Image (spheres, helix red, strand yellow):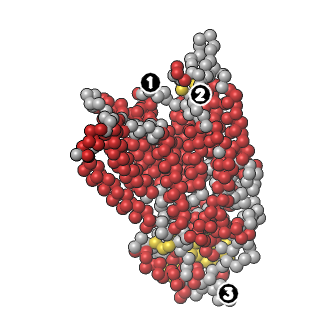
């Protein structure tokens, strides 16, 4: 009886509000489970644990920097001794070395996946703050994660992508689109009159502190990776176009604020001079950017008719749907021509160089969810015109329990089942992610793991010419940092033109891919005339480590069998020695025919990074090769 009295005395509005809050909590838990599943799935494509060909070098350079300081000239090479080295990835390599030495190689997989998730979460927060629906936001996020997965390897570029995403987040938050003000906001905004030509406008709430944060971000980005140059271009394009929009929208009265923003952009550029090389880094980067690199896959145009371009096509399709949504809903939300102009320019750059695809995907992640939400709302209205459409979007800052009761049905059982399924999916994908970050894998069919065992068993030392993709693997395992150090020095590696003259680069590719490569070639003005065999005599290398997947190199070495002797062969790699060294018993580096190993053994499986040829661990790692 007392209980019924309490219910009777309760105010009429309290019970619906309490029920609405309970529905809200249940709905929020369902949403939380959904986002957990989305983030768990995104963690898989954004955490590949396959080893990149340059990863060995990045770790080794970071270790050398911590031990010996920043080198002024190239190291580990015999073809570019004394050549100045512009290292534009200093902080990245130091971070790699510290993580590997203190927490193992798996910590880097965790580091890059967590960096990606930070950016993904900021995209979700930005989209929900702008009122995008869960469906449109999740769709964009999944497409973005898939699009950048191929480029999200353990390389310094990851820091460029993260810094680029943080920069776009700050710019979008600090300088939103100029909008017409309501009459009741005129007292807070700007009232401009010019013979009746200007409308009542109000500058959006600009958070200038977020622009100030870009100055230290640019300073850090410059020392992490040379991709800051692309960030500077996008920064000035955004600031310039947005300032023009603000100036025209206010009939010129907002030019002091716009001038302040542009001055801040100059401050960001000045912050990039805080690097060990000063302005020399910028001049080298500009010169490097304008040199074609058809030999490098990432610098080639995107192959639109290849299956590998499916993520790019998906991203392009989502972009077109978003643009259609922005156009169809122009009365509710005008098209942001600043953002769409930058999206168009970035998409054009993707067609020129496929390595720009992550930048385009990141812009889509931050800018497209509201427009895609408008498109989905329009389709829903046209498909179900007689039904009252549930709100497709709800800002994070506004939650109405009564609103939930009207538009959401409290199917408690279905929600419980949905939550359980989402939790199971999240746990499954999270378990896969946890297994992946335990270690980095070195594929035996991509790197000469078995050939390195042969080199270690016979203690090869001296000058080694190898294909460029294996150069940093060689120098990290056998490398002699200085010419006087014991070990192996390489003729070329993944540092490319940061420390190698263009003539050495051209000599290397003349041998490995030839002068008539299908992808084309670019030669420096100081390079010698093409001679495919010149690499075999440049500075007289002692050994050759060749990739059998390079047919041009195989043809050249077969024509030089009188000068070179095959010492090792498997299905992936070959090791050749100069005949006058390895065939002379008195040379001290003689390898008898019985010690040579010539076969076509198939290389398969994987070993743990760094795949060093150590008998105590190497044999046990081979056992794991069949269980990746």
Image location (x, y in percent) of residue 380: 32, 33
The answer to whether residue 471 is above or below residue 159 is below
Image location (x, y in percent) of residue 10: 31, 38
Report the Cα–Cα distance between label 3 and label 2.
79 Å
Kindly identify which residue carries mark 2: 203
Kindly identify which residue carries mark 3: 588
The answer to whether residue 255 is above or below residue 114 is above
* Disc 3: CA contacts within 10 A as few (<14), some (14-19) or many (>=20): few
- Please name whichever residue, 131 or 73, is drawn nearer the observer in this view of the structure: 131
Horizontal placement of 282 versus 418: left or right? right
Sequence order check, earlier mark of 2 and 1:
2
**Residue 535: quarter of image:** bottom right
Helix, strand or loop for disc 1 = loop
Contact between marks 3 and 2 (CB within 8 A): the answer is no
The answer to whether residue 275 is above or below residue 327 is below
Residue drawn at point x = 65 percent, y = 49 percent:
217
Residue drawn at point x = 57 percent, y = 30 percent:
204
Contact between marks 2 and 1 (CB within 8 A): the answer is no
Kindly identify which residue carries mark 1: 331
Sequence order check, earlier mark of 3 and 1:
1
Which of labels 3 and 1 is toward the front? 1
**Residue 270: quarter of image:** top right
Tell me the quarter of the image containing the C terminus. bottom left
Sequence order check, earlier mark of 3 and 2:
2
Residue closest to the far left: 1
Contact between marks 3 and 1 (CB within 8 A): the answer is no
Report the Cα–Cα distance between label 3 and label 1.
83 Å
Report the Cα–Cα distance between label 2 and label 1.
19 Å
- Please name whichever residue, 1 or 58, is drawn nearer the observer in this view of the structure: 1
Which of labels 2 and 1 is toward the front? 2
Residue drawn at point x = 28 percent, y = 52 percent:
416
């Amino acid at each position: 009886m007392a209980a019924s009295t309490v219910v009777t005395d309760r105010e009429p509005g309290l019970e619906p509000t309490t029920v609405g809050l309970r529905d809200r909590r249940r709905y929020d838990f369902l949403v939380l489970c959904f986002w957990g599943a989305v983030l768990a799935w995104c963690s898989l494509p954004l955490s590949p644990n396959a080893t990149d060909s340059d990863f060995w070098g990045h770790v080794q350079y970071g270790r050398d920097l911590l031990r010996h300081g920043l080198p002024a000239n190239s190291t580990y090479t015999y073809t570019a001794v004394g050549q100045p080295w512009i290292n534009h990835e200093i902080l990245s390599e130091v971070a790699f070395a510290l993580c590997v030495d203190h927490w193992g190689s798996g910590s880097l997989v965790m580091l890059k996946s967590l960096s990606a998730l930070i950016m993904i979460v900021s995209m979700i927060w930005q989209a929900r703050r702008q009122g995008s629906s869960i469906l449109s936001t999740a769709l964009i996020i999944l497409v973005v994660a898939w699009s950048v997965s191929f480029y999200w390897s353990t390389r310094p570029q990851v820091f460029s992508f993260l810094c680029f995403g943080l920069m776009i987040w700050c710019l979008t938050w600090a300088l939103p689109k100029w909008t017409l003000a309501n009459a009741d906001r005129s007292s807070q905004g700007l009232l401009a009159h010019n013979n009746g030509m200007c409308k009542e406008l109000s500058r959006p709430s600009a958070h200038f502190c977020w622009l100030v944060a870009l100055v230290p971000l640019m300073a850090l980005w410059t020392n992490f990776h040379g991709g800051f140059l692309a960030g500077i271009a996008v920064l000035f394009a955004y600031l310039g176009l947005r300032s023009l929009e603000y100036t025209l929208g206010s009939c010129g009265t907002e030019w002091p604020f716009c001038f302040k923003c542009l001055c801040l952009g100059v401050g960001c550029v000045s912050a990039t001079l805080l690097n060990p090389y000063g302005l020399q880094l910028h001049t080298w980067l500009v010169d490097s950017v304008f040199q074609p690199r058809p030999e490098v896959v990432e610098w080639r145009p995107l192959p639109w008719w290849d299956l590998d371009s499916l993520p790019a096509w998906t991203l392009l399709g989502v972009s077109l749907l978003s643009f259609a949504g922005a156009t169809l809903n122009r009365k509710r939300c005008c098209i942001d021509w600043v953002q769409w102009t930058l999206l168009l320019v970035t998409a054009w750059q993707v067609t020129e160089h496929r390595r720009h695809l992550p930048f385009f995907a990141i812009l889509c992640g931050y800018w497209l969810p509201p427009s895609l939400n408008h498109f989905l709302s329009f389709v829903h209205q046209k498909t179900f015109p007689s039904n009252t459409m549930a709100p497709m979007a709800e800002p994070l800052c506004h939650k109405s329990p009564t609103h939930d009761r009207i538009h959401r049905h409290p199917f408690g059982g279905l929600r419980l089942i949905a939550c359980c399924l989402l939790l199971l999916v999240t746990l499954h994908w999270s378990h896969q992610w946890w297994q992946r970050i335990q270690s980095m894998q070195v594929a035996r069919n991509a790197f000469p793991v078995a050939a390195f065992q042969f080199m270690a068993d016979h203690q090869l030392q001296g000058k080694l010419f190898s294909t460029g993709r294996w150069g940093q693997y060689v120098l990290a395992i056998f490398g002699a940092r200085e010419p006087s150090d014991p070990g192996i020095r390489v003729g070329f590696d993944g540092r490319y033109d940061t420390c190698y003259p263009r003539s050495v680069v051209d000599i290397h590719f003349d041998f490995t891919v030839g002068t008539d490569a299908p992808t084309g070639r670019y030669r420096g003005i100081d390079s010698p005339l093409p001679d495919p065999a010149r690499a075999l005599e440049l500075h007289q290398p002692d050994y050759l480590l060749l990739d059998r997947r390079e047919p041009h190199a195989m043809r050249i070495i077969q024509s030089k069998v009188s000068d070179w002797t095959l010492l090792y062969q498997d299905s992936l790699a070959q090791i050749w020695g100069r005949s006058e060294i390895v065939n002379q018993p008195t040379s001290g580096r003689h390898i008898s025919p019985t010690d040579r190993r010539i076969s076509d053994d198939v290389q398969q499986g994987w070993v743990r990074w760094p795949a060093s040829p150590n008998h105590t661990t190497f044999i046990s790692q081979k056992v794991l090769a069949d269980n990746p």
